[in-house]
Image (cartoon, helix red, strand yellow):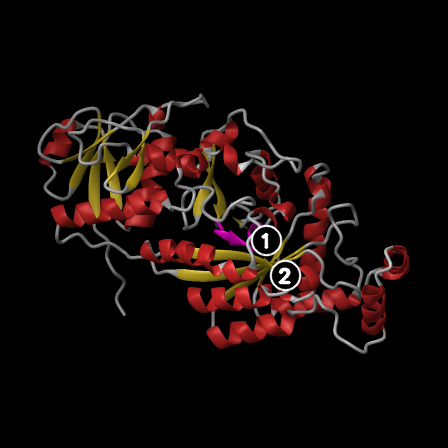
């Protein structure tokens, strides 16, 4: 089978910067699916006979001209005056001349969105030291549920194909990836004597006889632990053949880190068995954000349990601070991170639904860390949006549709306990099943 030979387009630019190359790598190479070459010489550009475009203040011939703002030619982080307006049903950022093929700078807009430029600027953070999505331009201007960068790339691809019918682009395929965080492998099992005794005491103090009885039956082996939903997960995965990933919390016990001890043989066996069917990654603990050395230990423990290197991660509680969090992951040879997403809303934190490389704005360089943005989380729907399970698909289905239209990756974030049908999670197992059936 012969590999597809991609077409090439030359791009006239006033000068070449790291930001410029990153933006064009992302939009032209990764999303549009063509190769490109920068030219700064006008004569060489004019004499070129193949597909070509210019990116600058003025066109020099009859080429497709894309107007630019200064963002991709700057260094440092400054408060940007980002104009947002509606253009052909799409939110456009960084307006340029109406005479340009697009009246906005799609390359600067894409760079500003995926680098999370606004998160480097002063902003409010929540009680868990997370970026508040209500602070984002996407939330304020109403495009949080739109993968704008992918939409821009599709518009650009259509434009180039119309101008150059022989242009060969490599086309991405839509993918569904189910990711599950194991924050608490079991509700009652493997908690140790002190935690179990304390839990019994709380049940009695609260007169919660049902929990007292359920815990006792689970510990005696009479019924299954309610958070043991792994057979259901694997059965659904085998039936629909979708990619699945697990992120394991191995942190020390704390207020926000309450998984079973990593020393538990049963827990280690669970990790190994799930990793036989899916990709396994580390779930850096809440505590590791204040004490980064803990992450190195957690990663070493998962590596030891799996007997192989671990290169995937997602932050517990989605605690992400730029650029510090990603720099710590890079130091530990993490290559792929799945934290980029929203806790308050469904949608696209970076306005993109395909993987991209982390660009360190402080250092003005692209890194080797690939970011995989997720779009829907169970806790978002239940706790923050306060959606009832019977209404959840009304919020999930439009997001899946948006991703399909641009051949992106629809990545969901679920937890084993939310599939338990236990107490507060009654009805959510069926939401997960419906989501899978809709997304595959």
Q: Going by the image, does 301 lie left or right of 344?
A: right
Q: The N terminus is located in which quarter?
A: bottom left
Question: Is residue 131 shown above or below 31?
Answer: above
Please state the horizontal and vertical placement of residue 348, each as a whole percent of the image: 45, 45
Residue 380 lies in magenta, yes or no?
yes
Please state the horizontal and vertical placement of residue 179, each as a whole percent of the image: 55, 59
Compare residues 376 and 360 and report the one nearer the observer.
Answer: 376
Residue tagged 1: 382
Occupied quadrant, residue 56: top left
User: Going 24% across and 54% down the picture, which residue do you hit?
Assistant: 169
Q: Going by the image, does 101 lie left or right of 229?
A: left
**Disc 1: CA contacts within 10 A as few (<14), some (14-19) or many (>=20):** some
Residue tagged 2: 418
Please state the horizontal and vertical placement of residue 112, each as a whole percent of the image: 40, 33
User: Going 44% across and 41% down the picture, which residue do you hit?
Assistant: 350
Q: Which residues are magenta?
A: 373-381
Compare residues 214 and 322 and report the one nearer the observer.
Answer: 214
Secondary element at tag 2: helix
Q: Is the Cβ of the residue at disc 1 closer than 8 Å to that at disc 2? A: yes
User: Across the whole image, how many numbered discs are drawn on residues?
Assistant: 2
Question: Is residue 439 shown above or below 14?
Answer: below
Q: Earlier in the sequence, mark 1 or mark 2?
A: 1
Q: The C terminus is located in which quarter?
A: bottom left
Circle on res. 171 = none
Real-space CA distance between mark 1 and mark 2, rounded to the nearest whole angstrom: 10 Å
**Mark 1, mark 2: which one is toward the viewer?**
1
**Disc 2: CA contacts within 10 A as few (<14), some (14-19) or many (>=20):** many
Residue 162 lies in magenta, yes or no?
no
């Amino acid at each position: 089978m012969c590999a597809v030979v991609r077409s090439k387009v030359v791009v006239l630019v006033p000068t070449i910067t790291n930001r410029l190359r990153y933006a064009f790598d992302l939009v032209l190479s990764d999303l549009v699916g063509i190769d490109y070459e920068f030219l700064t010489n006008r004569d060489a550009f004019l004499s070129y006979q193949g597909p070509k475009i210019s990116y600058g203040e003025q066109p020099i011939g009859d080429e497709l001209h894309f107007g630019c703002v200064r963002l991709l030619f700057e260094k440092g982080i400054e408060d940007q005056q980002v104009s947002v307006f509606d253009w052909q049903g799409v939110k456009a950022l960084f307006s340029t001349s109406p005479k340009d093929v697009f009246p906005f700078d799609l390359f600067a807009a894409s760079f500003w969105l995926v680098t999370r430029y606004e998160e480097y600027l002063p902003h409010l953070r929540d009680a868990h030291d997370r970026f508040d999505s209500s602070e984002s331009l996407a939330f304020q201007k109403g495009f949080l549920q739109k993968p704008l960068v992918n939409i821009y790339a599709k518009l650009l691809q259509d434009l180039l194909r119309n101008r150059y019918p022989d242009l060969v682009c490599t086309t991405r395929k839509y993918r569904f990836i189910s990711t599950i965080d194991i924050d608490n492998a079991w509700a009652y099992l493997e908690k140790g004597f002190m935690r179990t005794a304390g839990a019994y005491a709380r049940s009695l103090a609260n007169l919660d006889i049902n929990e007292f009885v359920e815990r006792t039956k689970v510990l005696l082996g009479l019924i299954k632990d309610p958070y043991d939903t792994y057979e259901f997960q694997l059965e659904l995965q085998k039936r629909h053949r979708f990619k699945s990933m697990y992120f394991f919390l191995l942190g020390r016990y704390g207020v926000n880190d309450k998984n079973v001890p990593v020393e538990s043989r049963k827990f280690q066996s669970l990790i190994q068995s799930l990793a036989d069917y899916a990709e396994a990654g580390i779930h850096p603990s809440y505590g590791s954000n204040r004490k980064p050395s803990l992450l190195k230990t957690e990663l070493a423990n998962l590596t030891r349990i799996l007997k192989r290197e671990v290169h995937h991660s997602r932050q517990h509680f989605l605690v992400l601070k730029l650029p510090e969090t990603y720099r710590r992951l890079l130091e530990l040879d993490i290559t792929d991170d799945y934290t980029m997403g929203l806790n308050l809303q469904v949608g696209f934190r970076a306005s993109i639904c395909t993987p991209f490389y982390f660009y360190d704005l402080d250092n003005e360089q692209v890194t080797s860390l690939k970011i995989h943005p997720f779009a829907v989380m169970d806790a978002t729907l239940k706790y923050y949006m306060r959606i009832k399970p019977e209404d959840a698909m009304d919020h999930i289905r439009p997001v899946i549709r948006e991703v399909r239209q641009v051949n992106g990756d629809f990545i969901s974030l679920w937890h084993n306990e939310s599939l338990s049908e236990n107490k507060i999670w009654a009805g959510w197992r069926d939401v997960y099943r419906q989501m899978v059936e809709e997304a595959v």
